[in-house]
Image: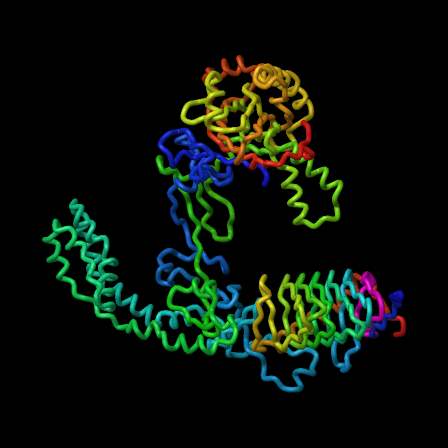
Amino acid sequence: MAPKIEYYCPCLSESPHPPPPNRPSSSYSFHPLHNLFFCEECDAVRCNRCVSVEVSGYYCPNCLFEVPSASVRAEKNRCARNCFLCPNCRNTLTVVPSDPPEDVDSRMSPIVSTTLGEPPFFLYCNHCRWDSAEVGITFEKPTGLAAQLQKFEDSAPEALEFERLKEHFEPFLRASSSSSALPSASSHHVHTNPITAAASSALARDIPGVGKYNPLSRSRVGREKGAHRQEYPDYKSRVEVGTALSGEADVEFLRHLETVSQVAALEQRWTNSWVSPLSASDLKPLRIPLQSKKSKRCPSCRHILIKPEQKAQSVRFKIKLVAANYLPAIAVTLPHAQAAIEMLKRTSKTTSAAAQAEEQQAAGALIAGHSYSFHLAFTNPLYDPIQVRLAKAIAPAQTAEGDEAAERARRSTFQIQLPSAAFPVGAFAEAWEYDDEDEAMFLDDDGMEVVEARGKKGKDGRGKTRSVGIVEKRANVTIVSGEVLIPKEARGDVKFNMLVSYTYRSDDPEPSEEAQTGTPSRSHGANKGPEMKNFSFYTVVDLGSIMYREEPKLTADL
Amino acid sequence: MPPIRDKFTIHSKAVVCQDVELKGDITIGAGKSSLHLRTIVHPKATIFAIAGPIVIGSGCIIEEGAIIVNRRKEVMRIGDDNLFEIGCRVESPTVGNCNTICTRARVHHTLRISSYCVVGAGVLVVPTEDEMLDEYTVIYGPAAERRVWSGRGKVQEMDLRRKHAEYLREMLPKFNRLRRGDGA
């Protein structure tokens, strides 16, 4: 598995610090960058879990007709034009005319004109060649088919029963919605459950021995509400439940079964709203379910984070505050794995794709008892350069140099070294605005400085120095290197939380100033400047799981 | 194995592009009725008669990248009005009439195809034992499910195929060199 990085959204926990990454539940707090939003008002990351979602429009995915929300309910959330799903394979169906009457002459003549369609018309699946004439559905004219089919649907006993139930509860719902304005909590509880009441009374009637579920009997507080309940009469079902189940016929059908495909598969049945036939040959075409375009709001300030354009054909957004436009994108790579994959590509060309994938996985493995360097590539989406500072996050307290070792020993078996100094990431610009001089200018002092600073630390920690610092800097991408040291007894995944904080400025920077901010002390000074802003966010870096092998052949020395 | 001897017989009305890979004993466009339309072979199609000869009827359309292979000693007969779509691979010993082999479908040499069959896009048909596909069989989907087509709409489909062939007969020679058979 390739190493990956995910970003933290603090919506699930009270503390701003992320949960330890080795907990299985922590995965719910971390998201890929492209799934996240960024609220400018709150200056915070928002994820799909915490935003509030609103439907901004309904449309049919097949004909892209925008359905006004008023008619969505009447059309039962399905396309009311000529869009149908094949009940057999769920492809879209086309309307075709019948074949002209077949005789010997038409077969022999080279081209028969079929432009004039002959009724009856029927629905035809181009994929599995199902046609609606098989289930006896044909049409006299090729337009308005959905209306004709909806008539069938609406006349189904289940649909009629549902309509009657709705009618029956209509006055009660209206009464309850008016009385729910009362501050009484108990009455609210009772009145919000007319569906429960209906279900329980239906259950009590159909299955002897099941008592009626009455919330009033449980909570004697709302006794005076009992009188209100009596006002509304019992509902008399007009559908016999016993016949709806039709167990005898099903048994008979199954007894004469020859192939499994005669029974409608689960996928064929569950797109249908009502009782669907058990045998595959009785399945009816389905009107295509509508889809909706949704806009999302920030949960705290109610500002819109993302809003699609109204038109169904359009794939653009009117408002789009996605985190990828605000936070630097980070990509993790393991150089030793990449080198190994390159080697494999060169040496073995004949092996199958599956075997190759397996080999690649083995090559990228982290073996216990070794240390590996990893690269973090930061891509700046902002139009201004940023200064990024990394820290290994140890919840709840921040990483302090003194107790770091003790913390590490307790929490994780592997050790992570990250560049401690801040490093710059260039501003995002259109591709043609970059030129070569930029890159040369940045690399010299910044890179040296950081490596040196890190090198000292490395010596007192492990006795040998490794390059932890800037590896490469070009355009708006800076690649820094970190190191992971895996002891022999380490097990599990190499997964750690990383706090990324970056400073950015709203004004355009002076080029001379830019060169100076490379040193950590200067950048700290610059932090206090009025035009500098700071933002930090947590990420989880997953480098992969530790292998227990003792074969050192694939560990490329880096 | 003796070296494959090339012998191409291409009907004078068939449209076979120059850039077609042919190998072995191949006959194209040997339809019984003269009223039938010509067979069209697009450029970059491959027809391989490795062991036995291949005989292709009239009115067939063989699209780009389609591969037709005969691995058996006996004659591989492909009937009339078949459509071999882009990138399909057919090794069936016999193919009847009016079949469609969709894009990137693969049919193994253990399957014989009768008439009016459809092998769906990307379907891999590899029966372990010799099998004859019944007429109007449709194979579709990733699991190679089968069902029997009612045959409604087949007249229209055949009309469409003839129009398709007719159009190609006019257009392909404008942009491609044509190949002529040895004898014809």
Residue occupying the point 26% across, 65% down: A165
In the image, which residues are magenta? B12-28
From the viewer's perspective, is residue B68 above or below residue A409?
below
Q: Residue A198: x and y, percent?
A: 23, 62
Q: How many marks?
A: 0
In the image, is residue B13 above or below residue B44?
Answer: below
Q: Quadrant of residue A58?
A: bottom left
Vertical order, A252 against A315 (above or below): below
Where is residue B160 drawn, in percent x and y?
A: 65, 72
Q: Residue at x 64, y 61 (%)?
A: B122
Please tell me which residue is depicted at 11% across the width and 53% down the height of the picture: A223
Q: Is B176 placed left or right of A540 in the picture?
A: right
Along the viewing direction, whichever of A512 and A274 lies nearer the viewer: A274
Magenta highlight on residue A314: no
Relative depth, front residue between A156 and A332: A332
User: Quick check: can you spot residue A320?
Assistant: yes
Q: How is the image coloured?
A: rainbow
Q: Position of residue A99 (x, y in %)?
A: 58, 79
In the rendered structure, the answer to whether residue A9 lies left or right of residue A472 reads left
Q: Is residue B17 magenta?
A: yes
* Quarter of the image that includes the C terminus of chain A: top right
